[in-house]
Image (cartoon, rainbow, N blue to C red):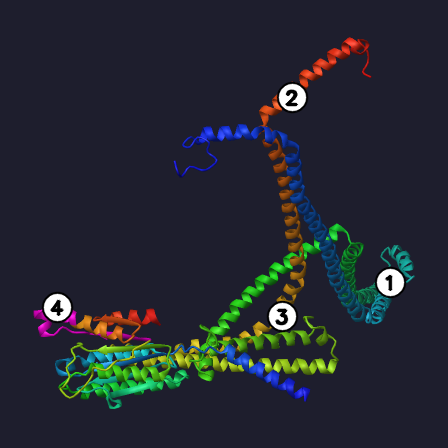
Amino acid sequence: MMRRRWLVASATLAAAFVSGCTEQRSHAQAVYLLVDTSGTYAQEVDKAQLIVNYLLGTLQSGDSLAVARVESRSFSEKDIIAKATFDGRPTQANAQKRVFRDQIAAFTKTARGSAYTDITGGLLQGAMFLNETGAGKKTILIFSDMQEELDKVTIRSVPIDLRNIRVVAVNVVKLKTDNIDPRRYMGRLEEWQKRVESAGASEWHVINDIEHLDQLLKASG
Amino acid sequence: MVDSPHWMIWPGNAALSALVVFLLALPFLYAARKPVHDLLRALGRLGESPLRHAARWLLGAADAMHVRNKSVLLAHGREEVGQHIAREFERVAALVKRDLEGYPALQRKLLDEITRVEEDYKKCGEVPPPPPDWVEAVAAVAKIKSNGNEMLQRILEEISRSVGEIHEKALAEYRRAYETRHKILDGFMPFWRSLDANLTQADRKMTSLHDRAAAIDAQMERYEQIVAGTDKAEHALTLSTLTQFVVAALVMVIAAGGTLINFKLIALPMSEMVGAGDYLTATLRTSEVAALVIIFVEATMGLFLMETLRITHLFPRVSNLGERVRKRMMWTAFALLLTLAGIEAALALMRDMLIADKQALLQSLSATQQAVAADGWLARIPTVGQMLLGFILPFALAFIAIPLESFMTSARTVGGAALVIVVRAAAFALRICGTLLRQSTRALIIAYDVVIGVPLLIERWIKTSRSTHDSDRLRVIDPVLEVGDRP
């Protein structure tokens, strides 16, 4: 009886030691890239491929990446073009990255413009995906002009939960109207910043030069 | 005015207030002079005494540690020199067994050669046959005058011819005899050479033995000094241990460099086995820990290999194992080390493949296609080099056991000596503090007297005048004391 108690106690101690030694906090990184394919912005989709390629080269085993398009209504899994959580084994992870690259290449060739731009829906979907991954660092990249246009039926005045998520607007090109009145461009970005920060996002950045994205991701990495 | 401190008699005039307070306090300070002096002395002693005691205790502890260190050092030295002497005796025994075992054969060979040389010498000494006795008779006949006698001339010619023939024959025989002797002398040479070689060999062996004997003498002298516990022996041993410590530390630093290279070589491919996404701590990946574990296991196997080969003696239990068990353990350690070395070589190959795969992926992802390097034998050199390195490093790391043992052994002495120095320095610092405290107390007493200088001057003046008055009175009462000796 005594011996059995000792065994149980030893096993409990060993389990506590092992669980104590293992780092509970996730070191993985998850990135959700929203690619705007609406209107004239669909021409920019080739640049999005460059960003995806860069992300594939940077992300490590255990990290997650998803690329989704922004359409008239983007709060849907169907809009996710490709997603992957890279395997722990580097060879498998490289194979996954090759498949991912091919999927994105195929998408860029067939991408068509949509009538409306539902960025909020994309953000909601992205936040859900990122929270599901359980990654330690979560980033949503919005490859868009940040001009949201919804049809009359679509409702997006819902609260968004972006806690512990960093949001980066990439390649925010100026519209014709912005050129006439730059305040529109500034106002649009300020509005998005307020919205994202009020949703609990940890950071908000606007990066128009893709090379600066490299610095941002490296600094956070 | 309202904010002025309460001690200020004249508010707004601090100097005057302080002066008045001081003058008022002066009589009290003068009256309290002796108790204040006593208090300061007591405080000084209170601080100084524990410091002095602590310093004395530390010095005692340092001396005890020094004695202990010395005994440990001498014991180590005795053991080391004893082993040296034992090894020298083993070498001498091997030399004696190897060389002197063949000495009777060598002696017999030398005697045989000397006998043969003697025999040949005797043969050389044989005198060639002397000329015949009738030579004198022929000389007498030769003196006979012929005087034209034909008969006599013919006889003489006949005699001359016969003698000539005999002379030729004798001369030929004489030459032949000398030729034989020369041949015998020629035959001497190999024997002389053999004799010379044998004697040189014997001389060399004797010199080697002599050298060993000299080495044993030197070690014995050292051993005697260690047993006697002389300062010279202690100094020499300390110096030797310090050198050993530094050299061992240096070698271990080099080995640490090797370990780092080894780690770099297998950390990446280990992620293929245990996954790259798991972390044990905030910055330490599981794959890195696994790589480190493999390296440490290799080092441990190397340690056991050295231990079972009796090169190191870190584990007395291993040294005391039976011969059969020890050999089994040795082969087990070697087999494991070999297996791990093989695994490392495979991991090194995998590392190269992983890097190539990653490179290919990055090239395919980049917008501009880079030129692909030719896949010739030159490209294989780094791969082969990494594999070789992966295979050799575990065996190289096995030898870390030797400097580790030296380091552990010498660290006791060096650490002990350093501790003694630290303890002595602490004792010295405490003594200095105690002395400073005592001197500070004295300075405070003097400073107190300076503060109450005016009352003290008055006291001295009164005492002087009183003593003058008393001496005048004494001079009047007993004038003899003025001129006489002191009572």
Q: Nearer the viewer, residue B342 or B20?
A: B20
Q: Tags 4 and 3 in contact by the CB under 8 Å rule?
A: no
- In the picture, the disc for residue A183 is 4
Q: In this orientation, does residue B313 appear?
A: yes
Q: Residue B276: x and y, percent? A: 43, 80
What's the residue type where badge 3 is placed?
Answer: Ala
Residue under label 3, please give it: B401
Q: Which mark is residue B460?
A: 2
Query: SS of the residue at dot 1?
Result: loop
Residue ID at (40%, 39%): B3
The answer to whether mark 4 and mark 2 are in CB contact below 8 A is no
Indicate left or right for A157 with B294 as reference.
left
Chain containing mark 4: A
For the N terminus of chain A, the image quarter is: bottom right
Same subunit, tags 4 and 3: no
Which circle's residue, 2 or 3, is located before the other in the chain? 3
